Amino acid sequence: MANIHTLLFAAACAVGLALAGAAAAQPAPGTVQGQLDNQQQRINQGVASGQLTPGEAARDESHEQSIQAQRNHDLAEHGGHLTADERAHLHARTEYNSHRIYDTKHNDKVAPR
């Protein structure tokens, strides 16, 4: 009986650690990477629902990739860290892109079914 309890306890601990590790791997909301991940999810949802045409999705993803490339460049320039000015600039670009995604998803164009 003790072995079953020990086994169940060990399994519960393993699941808890796996969930904690998965949560820790997620970028924090409000960070540039978190914003980019959120925007990618919104683009994917727009494609799945037909709110975005393939061309609109490609254009939105192109803008997102440009922001990601700038972020990677800025991180490489400063040893893996962003300066306050870089962070502010990237945040402004992600905010602009977020509005663009919204406008694209809510225009009168729909993907052919």
Image: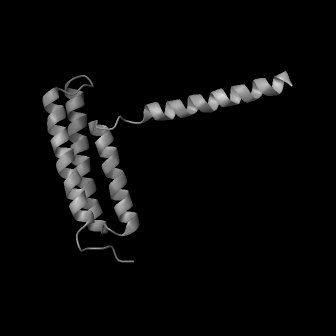
The N terminus - image quarter:
top right
The residue positioned 24% from the left and 29% from the top of the image is 75
Q: Position of residue 32 (x, y in %)?
A: 26, 38
Q: Residue furthest right?
A: 1
Q: How many marks?
A: 0
Could you tell whether 8 is left or right of 113 in the image?
right
Up the image or down, 44 lies above or below 16; here it is below
The residue positioned 20% from the left and 51% from the top of the image is 97
Up the image or down, 65 lies above or below 112; here it is above
Q: Nearer the viewer, residue 104 or 60?
A: 104
The C terminus - image quarter:
bottom left
The residue positioned 16% from the left and 27% from the top of the image is 84
Q: Position of residue 67 (x, y in %)?
A: 22, 44
Q: Nearer the viewer, residue 54 or 13?
A: 13
The residue positioned 30% from the left and 69% from the top of the image is 53
Q: Residue furthest bottom?
A: 113
Image quadrant assignment for residue 16: top right
Image quadrant assignment for residue 94: top left
Q: Nearer the viewer, residue 62 or 93?
A: 93
Colouring of the image: one colour
Q: Position of residue 108 (x, y in %)?
A: 23, 74
Up the image or down, 91 lies above or below 16; here it is below
Image quadrant assignment for residue 92: top left
